[in-house]
Image: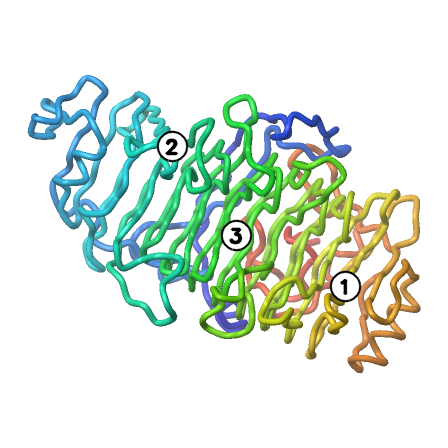
């Protein structure tokens, strides 16, 4: 998505809603919540995913023709030999998938069910299929009848696979799942995600996703135009003990994926990333907290453009991600970096608010050469209008890596109108291979000018005066972040409000 789209489009925001209670860290290691920002209860930005949404600034695919064909009902007391009407419901989701038609809706009555492999019953571009709970009824999907090695919900077609060669064209799902709780099971194998998507055109909307040994949501190369919207995503070790590298959302190679308006928390590893030649991913208006503490003494990042993919899977170029956008996110209490660019092309980070990240490794920002072909350095990274508040014990704002002695990024490299702050300590910077130890802002400025010809005009060692009330990282009156942002990088804020002509730095716009 181009910057001009953010500048000029309109957005329709559904009002914010209360979310969920605080949960323990997923590896049985209790992490003390940071002072003032917790999971309970908070607000989350919402996005409009209804039909005819011309003002969708994050370019979420329009769902067309939903509800234009017959509805099929499923109930715990149903019978798969029945007709699937409200008075004669089916018993399993698997059976419903064999009967649903393009434009149809599968409506599940209250209860707990097994999931399914969705390998038929697909919709069309003009007639999407919907899977949803009956109004006012709670539905949980957990486990798959095909065994513990299969995701609870698995969108599959024989022509669609993460190992597919570049340019592969496979069947499209045109499915939206809305308003369900989807969980994996204890003892699940490496592919026992809560949701795995191999096919294009799938949306997971307003769902609760939890509790998997591997990644909770896995989106592979052939799952272009997938979207995860308005969901709660977390690990809970009292239900399923996650694996050591269990991420929230793992996007490997898919193009045009949208991760918008979600609440991710208590994840043992990276909260979300796009890698493996992923193109045009957008991570926007998400809230991430208490993440990356899954392995004692080790840290993991919140949002990454890039990471590390096996080189044989990088079939579409040398970079892990291309043209990624990370905008208007609220990030708190992370063991690793809040925002990271790793072996990616044109990685953009605008108007994010990051509080107490880098608690074990890295810093608020990380620029690394973890992946790509032969550890490809990034090319083109922008950090503009972000707030970083670092813990006094680790006041590091920026870290780079020099894997195999390559420089972390080719230009252009842009740092503009950010706020750097650590209460009780002076912010520090590490820029390898220029200097390997923490240095003050002045030494970072000199290195940045020497290597890239750049000037970082960010406010260093300046308190942004955020409200740290539960669920709130809003600049208070008198904050130096207000009216201090560079213009033209995001028309709307975390809550879908218009930004002013002199916008606020960070995710939340304040007009005074």
Of the numbered discs 2 and 1, the one sitting upstream in the chain is 2
Location of residue 472 with respect to 381 vertically, above or below: above
Q: Which residue occupies the foreground of this view, 439 or 167?
A: 167
Q: Residues within 10 Å of mark 1 (few under 14, many from 20)?
A: many
Residue depth check, mark 3 versus mark 1: number of the one nearer the observer: 1
Could you tell me residue 219's position as x and y percent? 42, 52
Residue assigned mark 2: 148
Q: Is residue 18 left or right of residue 137?
A: right
For marks 3 and 1 on the same chain, the one whose residue lies earlier in the sequence: 1
Could you classify mark 3 by the number of other residues whose Cα lies within 10 Å: few (under 14), some (14-19), or many (20 or more)? many
- Residue pictured at 37% horizontal, 59% vertical: 225
Q: Quadrant of residue 451?
A: bottom right
Nearer to the camera, 33 or 337 = 337
Q: Count the marks: how many?
A: 3
Q: Position of residue 316 (x, y in %)?
A: 45, 72
- Helix, strand or loop at label 2? It is loop
Taking the view exactly as shown, the residue that stands out farthest to the front is: 312
- Give coordinates of residue 63: x percent, y percent: 29, 54
* Residue receiving disc 3: 496
Alpha-carbon distance for marks 2 and 1? 40 Å
Which is more foreground, mark 3 or mark 2? 2
Asked if residue 463 lies left or right of residue 290, the reply is right
Q: Indicate the position of residue 11 as horizontal and vertical percent values.
A: 45, 57
> Which residue is disc 1 drawn over?
400
Cβ atoms under marks 2 and 1 closer than 8 Å: no
Dot 2 surroundings within 10 Å: few (below 14), some, or many (20 or more)?
some
Label 3, label 1: how many angstroms apart (C-alpha)? Answer: 33 Å
């Amino acid at each position: 998505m181009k910057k001009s789209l953010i500048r000029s489009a309109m957005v329709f925001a559904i009002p914010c809603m209360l979310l969920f209670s605080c949960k323990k860290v997923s590896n049985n290691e209790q992490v003390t919540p940071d002072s003032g920002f917790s999971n309970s209860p908070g607000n989350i930005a919402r996005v409009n995913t209804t039909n005819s949404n011309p003002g969708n600034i994050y370019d979420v695919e329009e769902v067309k023709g939903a509800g234009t064909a017959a509805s099929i009902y499923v109930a715990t007391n149903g019978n798969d030999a029945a007709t699937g009407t409200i008075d004669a419901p089916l018993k399993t989701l698997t059976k419903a998938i064999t009967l649903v038609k393009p434009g149809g809706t599968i409506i599940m009555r209250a209860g707990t069910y097994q999931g399914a492999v969705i390998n038929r019953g697909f919709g069309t571009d003009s007639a999407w299929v919907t899977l949803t709970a009956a109004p006012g009824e709670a539905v949980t999907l957990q486990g798959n009848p095909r065994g513990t090695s299969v995701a609870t919900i698995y969108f599959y077609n024989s022509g669609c696979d993460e190992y597919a060669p570049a340019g592969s064209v496979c069947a499209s799902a045109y499915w939206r799942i809305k308003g369900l709780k989807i969980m994996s099971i204890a003892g699940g194998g490496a592919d026992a995600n809560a949701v795995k998507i191999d096919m294009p055109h799938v949306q997971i909307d307003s769902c609760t996703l939890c509790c998997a040994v591997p990644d909770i949501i896995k989106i592979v190369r052939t799952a272009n135009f997938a979207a995860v919207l308005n969901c709660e995503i977390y690990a809970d070790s009292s239900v399923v003990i996650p694996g050591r590298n269990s991420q929230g959302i793992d996007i490997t190679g898919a193009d045009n994926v949208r991760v918008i308006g979600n609440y991710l928390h208590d994840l043992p590893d990276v909260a979300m990333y796009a890698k493996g030649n992923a193109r045009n991913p957008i991570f926007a208006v998400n809230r991430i907290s208490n993440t990356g503490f899954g392995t004692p003494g080790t840290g993991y990042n919140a949002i990454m453009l890039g990471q590390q993919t096996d080189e044989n899977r990088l079939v579409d170029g040398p970079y892990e991600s291309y043209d990624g956008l990370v905008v208007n996110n609220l990030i708190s209490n992370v063991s690793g970096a809040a925002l990271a660019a790793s072996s990616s092309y044109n990685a953009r980070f605008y108007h994010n608010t990051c509080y107490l990240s880098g608690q074990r490794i890295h810093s608020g920002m990380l620029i690394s050469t973890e992946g790509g072909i032969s550890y490809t350095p990034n090319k083109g990274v922008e950090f503009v209008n972000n707030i970083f508040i670092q813990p006094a014990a680790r006041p590091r704002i920026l870290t780079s890596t020099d894997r195999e002695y390559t420089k972390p990024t080719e230009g252009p490299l842009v740092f503009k109108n950010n706020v750097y702050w650590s209460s009780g300590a002076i912010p520090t910077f590490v820029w390898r291979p220029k200097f390997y130890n923490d240095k003050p802002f002045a030494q970072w400025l000199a290195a940045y000018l020497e290597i890239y010809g750049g000037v970082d005009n960010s406010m260093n060692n300046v308190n942004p005066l955020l409200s740290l009330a539960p669920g709130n990282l809003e600049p208070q009156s008198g904050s130096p972040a207000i009216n201090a942002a560079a213009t033209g990088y995001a028309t709307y804020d975390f809550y879908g409000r218009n930004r002013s002509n002199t916008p606020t730095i960070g995710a939340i716009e304040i007009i005074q």
